[in-house]
Amino acid sequence: MCHIVDALICRAVRKSQATSIRAKVTTNSELHQKNVSAQMINIERRIGTKRWKRFKLEHPIQLTWTDTGGILTDLPASSAKYVNVFHIDHGENKLTIYGVSIPVALSDFLRDKATYSVTVSVMGRRIQLDIFWCGHWKTIRVEGTMPRVRSRR
């Protein structure tokens, strides 16, 4: 069984400064899971009090793991790992998906100051993060939430 424990904002200081948003994935299974992948399967945004608008993903987006830098990792029994979700280079100050080339249309979708709701799938379990993007990396806020169904009127 795999589930989210929390969401993490990590600020790295090196040659360039960046903020990464990562989801902590834990397993309470006694089995060692090999070649586990994580995919972004849904992304929506809400500007102010308007309705949620979904970005149509043609295919799930493969996310990278912090321990391997790749799209696959092993989850030892009763362990925790982090999957990269978003990345903000402080110089560019825009939301991107860490380690992944994204389509221009998705890059445009992520430009607005808005609340973004992202659903990540790991081993058939869904992790939902709400990212409150006010247009600057210093003011970003992240919450892990339970997946929910929204009306599509």
Image (tube, grey):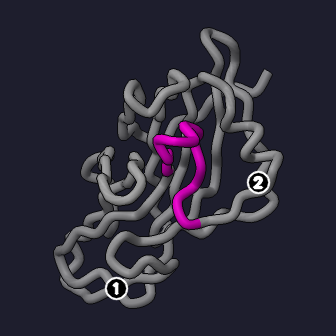
Looking at this rendering, what residue extends furthest in the top direction? Answer: 49
Q: Report the front residue among 93 and 20.
A: 93
Name the disc covering residue 57, or none.
Answer: 2
Q: In the image, is residue 93 part of the stretch drawn in magenta?
A: yes
Separation of residues labelled 2 and 1 (CA atoms): 26 Å
Q: Report the front residue among 131 and 98.
A: 98
* Label 2 crowd bin: few (<14), some (14–19), many (20+), radius 10 Å: few
Q: In the image, is residue 84 part of the stretch drawn in magenta?
A: no
Which quadrant: the C terminus? top right
Q: Secondary structure at mark 1?
A: strand
Q: Amino acid at mark 2?
A: Leu
Q: Residue at x 41, y 49 (%)?
A: 18
Q: Identify the image quadrant of residue 141.
A: top left
Q: Amino acid at mark 1?
A: Asp
* Label 1 crowd bin: few (<14), some (14–19), many (20+), radius 10 Å: some
- Give the residue number, with chain letter if any, for mark 1: 74
Q: Residue at x 69, y 64 (%)?
A: 101
Q: Residue at x 49, y 45 (%)?
A: 88
Q: Secondary structure at mark 2?
A: loop
Q: Report the front residue among 36 and 110.
A: 110
Q: Is residue 57 above or below residue 25?
A: above
Residue 11 in the image: state x and y as whole percent: 31, 47
Q: Residue at x 41, y 71 (%)?
A: 65
Q: How many numbered marks are there?
A: 2
Q: Which residues are magenta?
A: 87-99
Q: Identify the image quadrant of residue 41.
A: bottom right
**In this picture, residue 12 sits left or right of residue 84:** left
The reply to whether callout 2 and callout 1 are in contact (CB within 8 Å) is no
Q: Earlier in the sequence, mark 2 or mark 1?
A: 2
Residue 21 in the image: state x and y as whole percent: 40, 48
